[in-house]
Amino acid sequence: MNKPVRVRLHISGIVQGVFFRANTESVARSLALTGWVRNLTDGRVEVVAEGPHDKIAELINWCHKGPPVASVDNVEMEWEEPTGELETFKTRYGH
């Protein structure tokens, strides 16, 4: 049983300006997840993703490492109820 789940991640470290958002979008799309990724004003990156639990787990594991030039210090996770309103995975700009 692999029902859809939704997670909100806050990733801290050297994660802005190192292609973290673009790589996160690419990984999430390859996993057929929906959601978004954006930079926050405090230097963290926020990710909201929905999809099957096993695919969400793969994204979470990837976010703990990030792209080669990133340095992830911490990943905070908050599980939420899936809403189904998201159609794709994209990068959001602005805060």
Image: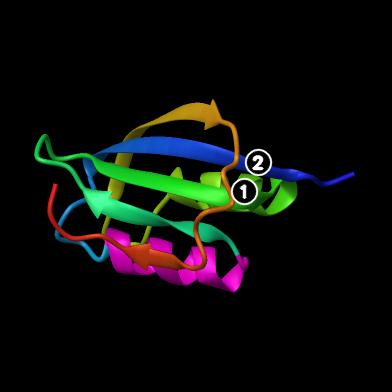
As drawn, the residue found furthest toward the right would be 1
Quarter of the image with the N terminus is top right
Q: Main secondary structure of the magenta part?
A: helix
Nearest to the observer: residue 92 or residue 44:
92
Q: Secondary structure at mark 2?
A: strand
Q: Residue at x 21, y 39 (%)?
A: 44
Circle 1 residue: 56
Residue 59 location, x and y as percent?
55, 52
Residue 36 location, x and y as percent?
38, 56
Lower sequence index among marks 2 and 1: 2
Q: Residue at x 51, y 52 (%)?
A: 62
Q: Residue at x 14, y 40 (%)?
A: 43
How far apart marks 2 and 1 lie (CA) works out to 8 Å
Q: Count neighbours of disc 1 (C-alpha within 10 A) and say few if under 14, some if 14 to 19, many if 20 or more.
A: many
Instruction: Give the amino acid type for the residue marked by disc 2 in the picture.
Output: Val
- Scheme by which the image is coloured: rainbow
> Disc 2 or disc 1, which is closer to the eye?
2
Circle 2 residue: 5
Nearest to the observer: residue 86 or residue 53:
86
Residue 29 location, x and y as percent?
52, 70
Q: Which residues are magenta?
A: 20-32
Residue 35 location, x and y as percent?
46, 56
Q: Count neighbours of disc 2 (C-alpha within 10 A) and say few if under 14, some if 14 to 19, many if 20 or more.
A: some
Please report contact status of discs 2 and 1: CB closer than 8 Å, yes or no: yes
